[in-house]
Amino acid sequence: MSETTTLSSAPSFRWFMLLLNILAYGQFFLTVQIPTVFSSYITADLGVSAMTVSLCGTIILGVFALTGGFGARLVAKFGLKLSICIAIIVNIIGALLILVIGHSFPGYAVCCAIEGLSGGLICGPITTINTYWFPIRERGIASGILLGILGVAFSIDTFFAPKIMASGVAWQTGASLLAAIPSIAIVIIYFLFAREVAQVYQGRLTVAEMLPAEAETSPKSNVENLPKSMDELKKHSYLWFAVICGFITGANVYGFPSFVNGLLLEKGIDMALANGVASITFFTSILGSPLGGLISDKVFKGSRWQIVCIGNIVIAASLLIVAVSGGTLLAVFMVIAYAAVSTVMGPFWAIPPELGHPSIAAEASGFCLIFGNLGGTIIGFVLTAVASATGTYYVPMFICMGMAVVSALLVSRIKR
C-alpha cells in the first residue's frame, strides 16, 4: 500500500496480535516458575538445599533484568516478529538442555541463565508492539491485558508439575517438557500468523498515524517532534524519571509478596485467613492491570501519567490504613493496595515506548525495562533481609509505601 494509506477504524487484527503476544510473553513467565514448582524434586535429586534451588529462579530473573535492552538490538537487525521468535527459540534451547546438563546444579543453573536471556530478549519487543498496532486510546488497556494475564502462566506450572511427576518421569524431563512443549507450539504459531504494521501497511510504522485526526486527538506531542535516537532521548530528564518509576513499579509488584503474609500474621490474623487474604490480594492483578489501562484510555484520553500517579497515591494511603487497622478493614485495604499496584502496572509500561519517536520504541521500552526488572529481581531479598534485621514486617511495608509516593511525584513530571 502507498504511504497515503488511511484507515476509518483500527484493524480488528490488533486483538489477534495481542493474543499472540500474550502467548509469546506467557511462555517465558511459565518458565520462571519452574524452579519453584519442581523445588522438592530438585533438592532430592541433586542433594542441594531449597535455598540453593531458589537461586535458580533468581538467576532467571537476574539475567532477564540485565539483558532487557538486548531485544532492541535484535529488532534493529531482524524486525519485531523475528526477534520475538528468536527469543522464544532461546527459551526452548535452555529448556531442552535441562535433559542434557541438568543432572548437576551448575548445569541446571546454566539452563536457567539461558532461559533468563530469553526473557531479556523478548521483553522490550513484546511490550512495544501495542504502540504499533493499537490507537493511542487503546494502548493502556492492551498493555494492561498483556501484563495482567501473566499470572495465569504461574498457575499452569502449579497445576501441571505434580501431574507430570506422578507419571514417574525424572524432574529434568518434567521441567524440560513443561517449558519446551508450549514454547515450541507458540513459536510456530507466532511465526506463521504474527505481522508487523509495516508489512501490512507499507511505509507506515503505526496504526495510529493512519486513523482520522479527530479519532486520535490527544494531549500527546506530535511524534515527529520526539527524540529519534536513544542518545537524544537520554538528554531528557523525563526518561530518567521513567527509569526510577519503572524500578519502583517492578519493585512493588514483586515486593508485596515479601511482606503481605508475614504482616497479616504479625497483626494477629489467623494463618488460614491470612493465606486466603494473600491469595485474593495477588489475584487482583488479573483485573487491576487491565482496569488501569482502561481508565487511562477512556477517562484520561490516552494519557497514562494521571492513573499511574493516582494508583501510587492509593497504594500509599491503603498501606497507611493497613498499618493502623486490624480485622476486616486491614484485609480489605491490603487487597486494595495490591489492586492499585496492578492498576499502575499496565498504564505505566505503556509510557516508555512513547517517550521517543516510534522508530526507537523498542529501545526506549527495553532501556526502562532493565531497571523495572532489576527492581523486581532484588526487592524480595532486600525486603526479606530488612524484615529479618528489624524483626517486623512493618518496615518492608513502609518502604513500599515510600516508593509509591516517590513514583507518584516523578510520574507527574513525565506527563505521557
Image (cartoon, rainbow, N blue to C red):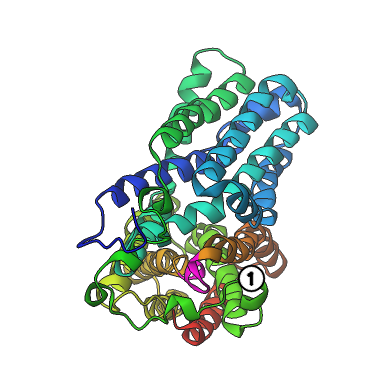
Residue 271 seen from this side: yes
Q: Residue furthest left?
A: 8
Quadrant, the C terminus: bottom left
**Mark 1 Cα-neighbour bin, 10 Å: few <14, some 14–19, many ≥20:** some
Q: Is residue 104 left or right of residue 146?
A: right
Q: Is residue 218 left or right of residue 190?
A: left
Q: Quadrant of residue 5?
A: bottom left
Magenta-colored stretch includes residue 353 = yes
Q: Quadrant of residue 7?
A: bottom left
Q: Residue at x 63, y 24 (%)?
A: 96
Residue 284 seen from this side: no
Q: Residue at x 69, y 70 (%)?
A: 390
Q: Residue furthest top?
A: 168
Q: Is residue 16 left or right of residue 86?
A: left
Out of 88 and 161, give the one closest to the viewer.
88
Out of 176 and 218, give the one closest to the viewer.
218
Magenta-colored stretch includes residue 181 = no
Please count the marks in the image. 1
Magenta span of residues: 351-358
Could you tell me which secondary element the residue under label 1 belongs to? helix
Q: Amino acid at mark 1?
A: Met
Please name the residue that numbered disc 1 is placed on: 230
Name the spot of residue 313 as percent of width and height, x first: 43, 81
Name the spot of residue 366 as percent of width and height, x first: 59, 60
Out of 258 and 225, give the one closest to the viewer.
225
46, above or below 246, in the image: above
